[in-house]
Amino acid sequence: MNKYWISCSKFTCKFTEQNGKIVDSAPIIRKFIGQSTNNLLSWISRKFGEYDLRTLNNE
């Protein structure tokens, strides 16, 4: 599992990815659980512009 911190102009939160799919997240991006991380990043980019994505830890 990989844990990430993501921040954009509207929110900052954490999410967890396993095998390329989001398995846990903050409520604001919970609709992306089960989807690929790329879907989330594309949505944030389209909706809010720039974002900062950082790896917290890898298990």
Image (spheres, helix red, strand yellow):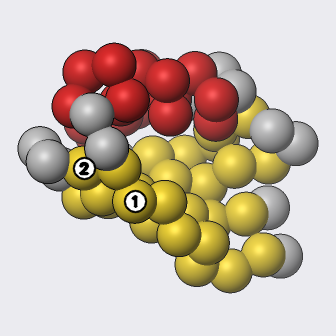
Q: How many marks?
A: 2
How far across and down, in percent of the image, does residue 17 sit? Answer: 69, 49
Q: Residue at x 58, y 21 (%)?
A: 39
Examine the rendering and report whether any part of residue 50 can be seen: yes
Residue type at numbered disc 1: Asp
Is 23 on the left or on the right of 20, as rendered? left
* Residue occupying the far front of the picture: 50
For the residues labelled 1 and 2, the Cα–Cα distance comes to 6 Å
Residue at 65% x, 22% y is 35
Q: What is the number of the mark on residue 52?
A: 1
**Residue 55 higher or lower than 16, as above or below:** below
Query: In x, y percent, where is residue 21?
Result: 73, 34
**Residues packed near mark 1 inside 10 Å, few (<14), some (14 to 19) or many (20 plus):** few
Measuring 54% from the left and 46% from the top, which residue is drawn there?
Answer: 24
Image disc number at residue 6: none
Dot 2: element: strand
Mark 2 crowdedness (10 Å alpha carbons): few <14, some 14-19, many ≥20: some
For the C terminus, the image quarter is bottom right
Q: Residue furthest left?
A: 10
Image quarter (top left, top right, bottom left or bottom right) of the N terminus: bottom right
Q: Is residue 11 above or below residue 44?
A: below
Instruction: Give SS at disc 1.
Output: strand
For badge 2, the amino acid type reads: Cys
Mark 2 — residue? 8
Mark with earlier residue (1, 2) = 2
| Res. 32 visible in picture | no
Instruction: Kindly check if marks 1 and 2 are in contact, taking CB atoms under 8 A apart as contact.
Output: yes
> Residue at left 14%, top 48%?
9
Left or right? Give the position of 19 relative to 9: right
In the figure, residue 20 lies in which quadrant?
top right
